[in-house]
Image: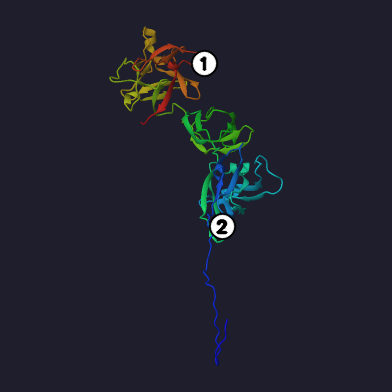
Amino acid sequence: MTLSGSGIAQALWTAAAVHPTASVRSGAVTISQAGFAELATTYTSTALSTTKLITVSNEGVPASYSLVLGSASSTPASFAEAITVRTWAIDAADTCASTPSTGTRSSTWASGLTLSGSLAPGASARYCVQTAITSAAAGNAPGTTMTARMDLQARADNWTSPVTTLTIVQKVADTAPRSLAAVKKTASSISLSWDAPDDKSVTRYQLYQGSTAVSSAQTATTFTDTGLTANTAYGYTVYSVDGDDNRLAASNVLAVTTDRKVPAPNTWYHVVTADGSCVDAAAPQEEGRVLATTLCSTASSSSFRFVADAEGAYTVNAKTNARVWDSRAKKQGSSDVTLSVEDGGPQRLERHFALISVDDTTGAFQIRSMQVSKHCMQSGASGAALTMQSCDTTIPIQDDQQFTLVEVAP
């Protein structure tokens, strides 16, 4: 530097040129996870928890991460609160086979839980995640489903990765017997059926009529309650039970009313054979007309009314022409059941019949002649005549001597 001249001083110098520079470290913030999807599960009475390994891996530059576990907004809060979430970190050589006595964190799906840390490039963190529900909570929520979510994000300096969101479904198996229904009823019995629940730990059922147990070791999904009172309402509930005798869940409550006692006064009936055909007195309904079986229909020729006499037997009236059933042909060399006129004469017992209950579960009867008590009405193939034959006394009674009464419109 040189100073020269007089008056105002001046300074002059020479400097080297300076060129400004900047460097940027290139790289990617890449954090991933594996294992969250394995937490999808169905809880049963014998599997009330699941434990899976979640691995968080860094495949980019040094970064921190945040993995948030929680429930989706659509999940019922009370159900999400009932499922606990426990986590603990493990080394690379460890497994999730056992839960440590210390070092675990606990929350619920509803409250959520965050796993966080920092990873060098190529490093990973391993967490065991256990979710569980109590037997009582599961029993109160059969068939309930919830959606759990995981949000994963990484940060390196001022760089932040997009949030990765995954969801899984956890549910409680439906342990309740489904669709309890009455499939058949008579004046003295009700036959029930139901669908088995999803939970394969169910081994049997308890069936209640009101508050009274009517079966406590039922393995089939059907049951017939017998010895009931006619025209009476009954309520039924079926409970599922597992192999450890834990009662799991209840079916729907079913209300059923037994049929009126048959035959009821002033009521018309189809007389139905064991194969589902109907007794018919087709036109012309005249003296000696032979009864036969046919397909059931609304035709008046298939409707009959049972009129009680003083001895508890019945005359069976056709709906037209005031004719009644008659068994006299058995004494005249023929076995056919015919139509006749009820005249109250000396042969009246040939036109009176006793109904003998033979199957309480189906309401089936034998129809016996009051004239010859060893003779019973017997059906044949559809279209064949009804005949009087020797009464079967075996158990069960042969099908062609079993008849049921089905009420029809007047």
In the displayed orientation, state which residue is furthest to the top: 333
Name which residue lies at 52% across and 57% down: 26
- The amino acid type of the residue labelled 1 equals Ile
Q: Quadrant of residue 344?
A: top left
Q: Nearer the viewer, mark 1 or mark 2?
A: 2
Q: Could you say which is closer to the camera, residue 200 or residue 339?
A: 200
Residue beneath label 1, please? 395
Q: Could you say which is closer to the camera, residue 4 or residue 352?
A: 4
Marker disc for residue 31: none
Estimate how packed mark 1 is, as few (under 14), some (14 to 19) or many (20 or more) residues with alpha carbons within 10 Å.
few
Q: Quadrant of residue 353?
A: top left
Q: Position of residue 332 (x, y in %)?
A: 36, 7
In the displayed orientation, state which residue is furthest to the right: 101
**Which quarter of the figure is the N terminus placed in?**
bottom right
Position above or below: 123 against 338? below
Horizontal relation, residue 401 to residue 135: left or right: left
Does dot 1 land on a helix, a strand or a loop? loop
Name which residue lies at 62% across and 54% down: 118
Does dot 2 land on a helix, a strand or a loop? strand
Residue beneath label 2, please? 155
Q: Position of residue 375 (x, y in %)?
A: 44, 12
Q: Position of residue 244 (x, y in %)?
A: 64, 33
Position above or below: 236 against 115? above
- The amino acid type of the residue labelled 2 equals Arg
Position above or below: 77 against 184? below
